[in-house]
Amino acid sequence: MITSVLVANRGEIACRVFRTCRELGISTVAVYSDADADALHVREADTAVRLPGAAPSETYLRGDLVVKAALAAGADAVHPGYGFLSENAGFARQVADAGLVWIGPPPEAIEAMASKTRAKELLGIAPLTDVTEADLPVLVKAAAGGGGRGMRIVRELGDLEGELAAASAEALSAFGDGEVFVEPYVENGRHVEVQLLCDTHGTVWALGTRDCSLQRRHQKVVEEAPAPGLPAALEASLLDTAVRAAKAVGYVGAGTVEFLVADAPQAHGSGRTGGTPRAQFLEMNTRLQVEHPVTDEVFGVDLVALQLAVAEGRALPPEPPAPRGHAIEARLYAEDPARAWAPQTGVLHLFELPGEGRTRLDTGYVSGDTIGVHYDPMLAKVIVHAPTRAEAIRKLAHALERARIHGPVTNRDLLVASLRHPEFGDPGLLDTGFYDRNLDALTEPRAGEAYAAVAAALAGAVARRGRFGGGWRNLRSQDETRTYGDHEVRYRPTRDGGFEVTAPEGVRVVSADAGRVRLEVAGVVRDFLVAAYGDGVVHSGPHRLAVRPRFTDPREQTAPGSLLAPMPGTVVRVADGLAVGDRVTAGQPLLWLEAMKMEHRVIAPASGTLTALHAAPGRQVEVGALLAVVSDDATTAAQEDQTV
C-alpha cells in the first residue's frame, strides 16, 4: 500500500492530487522552487522540500533533485501531475530505480507514445520533410510535452526556419527537449480526445470523449464531456482506436488519445469544407490531462484515486461506470485576451467563487497569493456538472459571472461571453477557429461598466469623506469628477448626505458607502460591491476599472517608437546581429520575451532606425520597461536637422 506521495509538480495539479491523497489517508510531500516558497501547494502538503532556483530547468525539470527530495521526505511513491517531467521516461526510470512507486505508465509506453514523432511512427504516420509551398500551412510542434508550447503555425515558406528555431527554444525551456517536427495544419477542425485508464491485469477503460476545441495559442480554454454532436459511428471509431493504441504499447494508468475531427458540417465563416466528419490522430498524452475533471464528473469517478489504485496493483472492474449528464470546465487565466493574451502578474487580493458544493474549483491560488512570472498563468479550473449540456453552460457562466476576482486582469469576462455565444451553444459550429473569428466581439467592454464606474466613484467619495470629513456646502461648488478607463463620472454631494450623479445621465443613488453602492437606472436597482487596494484599480461588481489619474506623470512619457515590455519576463533572444544604428522594417521581430512559460515576440512598430537597444539575453524586465527605440524616417530626419 502507498503511504506517502510526492507530487513532482506545482500549483493546481499538486493541490488536486493532495486533496485525493488526504481523502485516502495518504501523506503528501511537495517540492517547490524559490519562486514558489509560499505557494498554496506547499502550504497544503504535509511536508515540503526546496528545489533551489526559480527556472523550471533548475527545479521542476531536475529529476535527480526530485527523487532525492522524495527519499529525504520518506515518500514511497511519486505522482508527476502534468507538464514538466510527467512524460519523461528517464524520470520514470529514476523513480523506479530509487525503489519508489511510479504513478504512471511504464517507461517503455512513455517512450513509445509520449514523443509525438515516435507515436506517429508507431501508427505509420510520417512527419513532413522538405516542406514546399504546396504543403502550406504547416504546424511546427514540440515532440515532447504539450499545452501549446513549442507550437507555431507557418503560412509563408520563408518563415519556416525562424519558427523552427523559436519552437525548439521554447520546447527546450518548457520540457527540457528541443526536438520539433512539422505536420500539415488543418484549419478549424474540432479537437476531440478519449480518456483511457488501464490496469496491470489487462483491463482497458475508454471513459468516453471530450471536446477541447476552444483554444488560444493551441492551448485549451474550455473543455467538456462528452464531446457533443459526434456521429455514433465516429465516436465508436475514436474509442476503438484509443483502446487499440493503449493495448499496442502495454499501457498502464491514465492516458489520453487526441484527435482532430475535420470536415465537420459547414460553420458560419469557419472555412470548413463540409462532408462526413473524419478523425486525424494527433498524439497520445501519457499522463493525467488538465481537463480530466469533466470525465470525473460525468462518470462519477476520481481519476487520481484510480491512478493510485492501479499503481498499487489493484484490478479495475471489467467495465467502467455508466456516464451521466454533461460536464464543462473553464480555465481561468491571469491574462489579458484583448492584448494578445498577455500574461498578468501581481497580488490576487480576493478570489471567491459562489455556489460552493455545487461548483468544483481546482486551483493553486487563494486570496492574498501573488501571481509570479515564472510559470503558467492558469489560476484555476472551474467545473460544473448538469443533466444536459445547455444546463451545464448556463450554470458555469453564472458561477463565473458571480465570482469575485480582485487583482490582475483575468480572462473571466471572455469565458462568460464564450459560453453564452451562439456558436458555442450549437455543437455543429464548434471548432478551433472560434477565437480567431470572435475575439474582438468577445473582448468588448461588458454592459453596465459605466454604472460600475459611478459606483466606484461614489464609494471612493464616501471613503474620503470618512477619512477627511467634508460633504455638502451652502455655496455649491463645481461637480466632482473621476475617470475610470473611458468612463468619466461627475457627481456632487446633496444636503441629506447623499449624492447626485450628473454624468452619466439617468442614474439615481439609492445608497452609498465605502464598500457597497446601490444605483437605480431606468427603474432597475443595481447593486455593486466595491473594493480598492491602492494599486490604481477599483473592482466594482464584476468589473475591473483602471483609475485614470487627474494629472499625467511626466515620468510616464516615452519617446516615439519606444518598445516597452508588454509583461514582466525574461529576454531570451535578440535578433541575430541586431545593433543600434541598424535599419529595421515594420513587423520585423527584434527580440523575444519569455513570460509564464510562453514566448512573446517584440516587433518593430514601423520601418526606421534602431536608435536604442536596452535588451540582452537573460535580462529580467518588469512590465513597461524600455526595451528598444525605433525612430521612423521622419523622426530620424528631424533629429538630424536639429544637430546640424
Image (tube, helix red, strand yellow):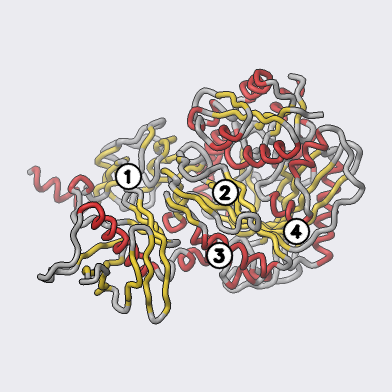
The secondary structure type at the circle numbered 2 is strand
User: Residue at horizontal 50%, vertical 25%?
Assistant: 53
Residues under labels 2 and 1: Cα distance? 27 Å
Residues under labels 3 and 4: Cα distance? 25 Å
Q: Quadrant of the N terminus?
A: top right
Looking at numbered disc 2 in the image, what kind of residue is underneath it? Ala
Looking at numbered disc 3 in the image, what kind of residue is underneath it? Ser
**Residue ranking furthest to the bottom:** 523
Looking at numbered disc 1 in the image, what kind of residue is underneath it? Gly
On the image, which quarter does residue 428 sit in? bottom right
Query: Which numbered disc flags the more N-terminal residue, 2 or 4?
Result: 4
Which of the two discs, 2 and 3, sits closer to the camera? 2
Residues under labels 2 and 4: Cα distance? 30 Å
| Numbered label tally | 4
Report which residue position mark 2 lands on: 380
**Residue 335 screen position, x and y as percent:** 47, 51
User: Residue at horizontal 61%, vertical 62%?
Assistant: 396
Residues under labels 2 and 3: Cα distance? 17 Å
Report which residue position mark 4 lands on: 279
Query: Which numbered disc flags the more N-terminal residue, 1 or 3?
Result: 3
Dot 2 and dot 4 residues touching (CB under 8 Å): no
Whether residue 202 can be seen here: yes
Report which residue position mark 3 lands on: 418
